[in-house]
Amino acid sequence: MFNLTQTAYWTRRLLKIGAFLLIAIIFLRFSLRLFSSVWQKLNPPPPPPPTVSFGKLPVIKFPEKSDSGIKLNYRLETIQGGLPKLTEIAKVFFIPKEGPNLLALQRATQEAKRLGFSSEPQQINETIYRWNNGATPLTTLDININTGNFHLLYAYENDAEVINSQDLPANQQAAQEAKNFLDAQGLLTADLATGSAEFVYLKYSSPNNLSLATSLSEADFVRANLFRADLDGLKILPPNPKNSLISFLFSGVRTLGRRIVEINYNYYPIERETFATYPLKNAQTAWQEMQGGKGYIANLGQNENGNIVIRNVSLAYYDADQPQNFLQPIYVFEGDNNFIGFVPAVANQWTE
């Protein structure tokens, strides 16, 4: 039989052994979790295969541009020393397209009234109707009756006070006034409300001719370009990223109707919950297409000599200025002197 001394001794031994085993188990579990985490980071599971649920996609329609006659020679000089490794699969989103219908003109007339125009419209072509306010200087409103997109223009060249007043809004004030205007018209969607804005300072040179100013203090007008918020981690870029599809031109006059002298509103809603995934061509293939003249020159910049140095290559979504059924990814080639070029990113076998 154990006496008290032996019992105490073995109790202490068992407690020590138990404590050691507990520490060992905890350490082992921690080590296994750490190993599993490191292993998964070093060996991530392959992404699910592309769904390609929309079938073959229509080739992106970029705007037609006249041939400048400049032969472009490309050179790649990125920070990485080469092309980046980008994702191999990306989402393609559905864009509903409004077709002609019997109520289109009626809806456009209601939109014109909300914008302050009650005159009878003039038909410019099959889809564009024009309203004016009958005032001097004249303000005109052109609406695409199928899409609801519009262009508003005040004849500011006939208003000396507007041209000469330099009490222009600061950048953030201009952006807020633009968004307030859209909100009042029921046009401030979530992606515009949370999107970015860029600003251009302009000087009046002659009718229909505004030139760049170096600063706000030297400008006669400021243009606020509104962009959509990023989608799925990628920027959404218009045909020329220097000019958004939604822009407001502000004067220094604070009178209603003369403060905002021009509005371009060109917007197509994106069905963010309706998408499919598609395989992408790799960056090397896109680069070869760019070099081979198959890309779209979104902005030549100050590169009249034709020698283009590319500094950055990335993915984005293309925000078309004309109705297209899908929001598709593109490769973006950015270079010196404001050069920007696009190449469709979806693998060629999945476009037609």
Image (spheres, rainbow, N blue to C red):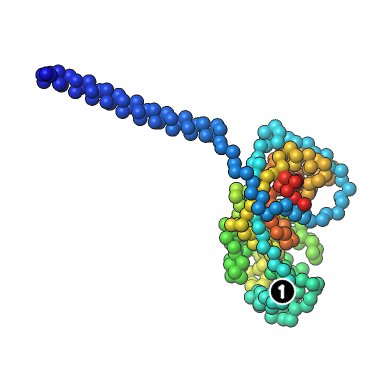
Q: Quadrant of residue 290?
A: top right
Could one spot residue 279 in this view of the protein? yes
The answer to whether 283 appears left or right of 65 in the picture is: left
> Measured from the top left, where is residue 312 in percent x and y?
70, 40
> Measured from the top left, where is residue 10 in percent x and y?
19, 20
Residue at left offset 74%, top offset 37% = 284
The answer to whether 1 appears left or right of 147 in the picture is: left
Q: Residues within 10 Å of mark 1 (few under 14, many from 20)?
A: few
The answer to whether 168 appears left or right of 339 in the picture is: left
* Callout 1 amino acid: Asn
Q: Nearer the viewer, residue 93 or 18?
A: 18
Residue at left offset 27%, top offset 26% = 18
User: Which quarter of the image is occupied by the N terminus?
Assistant: top left
Could one spot residue 112 in this view of the protein? no
Q: Which residue is mark 1?
A: 101
Q: Quadrant of residue 71?
A: top right
The correct choice, above or below, for 56 with respect to 111 in the image is: above
Of all residues, the one furthest to the front in this rendering is: 1
Q: Quadrant of residue 309?
A: top right
Q: Nearer the viewer, residue 178 or 185?
A: 185
Q: Nearer the viewer, residue 303 or 83?
A: 83
The correct choice, above or below, for 22 with respect to 305 in the image is: above
> Measured from the top left, where is residue 53 in percent x and y?
65, 53
Residue at left offset 60%, top offset 50% = 232
Residue at left offset 87%, top offset 51% = 67
> Measured from the top left, where is residue 123 in percent x and y?
79, 76
Of all residues, the one furthest to the right in this rendering is: 69
Q: Secondary structure at mark 1?
A: loop
